[in-house]
Amino acid sequence: MSYKLPLGRKIFIAINIPLLIGIMLLSIVPFVHLLAVSLSSNAAASSGQVKLWPIGFTLDAYQFLGQKAEFIKSLGISVQRVFLGTIINMLLVFLTAYPLSKTNEQFRFRTGYVWFFAVTMFFGGGLIPTYMIVKETGIMNTIWALILPGALNVWNMVMMLNFFRGIPRELEEASKIDGAGHWSILWRVYLPVSLPSIATIGLFTIVGHWNSWFDGMIYMNSPANYPLQTYLATLVTAINVKSITIDDLSALQNLSEKTLRTAQIFLGALPIMLVYPFLQKYFVKGITVGSVKE
């Protein structure tokens, strides 16, 4: 028995598929263009001849970035920041969202705590007070200055809270009958069924730490401690003339500011582009699940 699509469905498909293909191309083409420019010669890139395919193929821009000790060190700092920051952020989100997902009968003064955290979403202390706190705590010029000031993302906590509230209470009640406490319920019941939300929040956290550059500029007194994004942001605009060697000068003759910038942007975006496809199936579901509470 054959099934015929309704006319409205056919019209929707006819419009939606080309529209989605167009959006996909709009998203992919800029990265292809960046890659093409970064792999092109100085003359071709500077004259604007490069579109979607390299002209005068060369790896000079990537070789120049890759052979710099500062680049390798800043990459290591960013990897360390993403690793430690994601673990701390996610742990605090779990430990905060779990009690706040309970009712007022289960957790006294829950509403007051929720408002305490909600206020921080609309009002911040400001750059100068935050800088003073970081300085007085003695973590300036360390990796912790990049992690601890934003250790708890309230927006992510609210997303996880809503997801926890959507978990059937029968699971928790059955665990309590078996003698499980709150720690066991959180780690053995709530988190295993919350993979979509965890993947979504984890992706937000990873992207936030990887792309952040301004805090490195503020809290790091030495360029040697810059994370990758801060280092890349200052590589072209603030080149340290004393650190340029003869080999660097010969390499810079074949490079332009445009090829260096495009190589920076592409390298900065590449890790997230590689991670996202593995989390996409959880990401889409995690955005919607828990967003509506009955």
Image (cartoon, grey):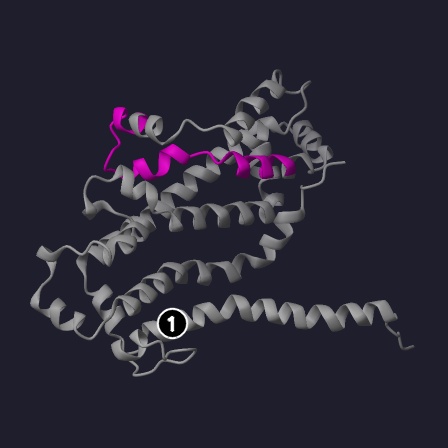
Q: Is residue 181 visible?
A: no
Image location (x, y in percent) of residue 75: 28, 55
**Residue 135 among magenta residues:** yes
- Residue 173 occupies which quadrant of the picture? top right
Image location (x, y in percent) of residue 177: 69, 28
Residues drawn in magenta: 133-162
Q: Residue at x 26, y 79 (%)?
A: 43
Q: Residue at label 1?
A: 35
Q: Residue furthest right?
A: 1
Is residue 171 toward the left or the right of residue 236 in the image?
right
Foreground pick, 160 / 217: 217
Q: Residue furthest front?
A: 47
Is residue 288 toward the left or the right of residue 96 in the image?
right
Is residue 99 toward the left or the right of residue 267 in the image?
right
Q: In the structure shown, which secondary structural element does the residue marked by tag 1 occupy?
A: helix
Image location (x, y in percent) of residue 35: 38, 72
Q: Is residue 145 above or below residue 240?
A: above
Foreground pick, 20 / 267: 20
Q: Quadrant of the N terminus?
A: bottom right
Q: Residue at x 54, y 22 (%)?
A: 116
Q: Is residue 291 above or below residue 237?
A: above
Q: Is residue 179 above or below residue 150?
A: above
Q: Residue at x 35, y 63 (%)?
A: 267
- The kind of residue tagged 1 is Leu
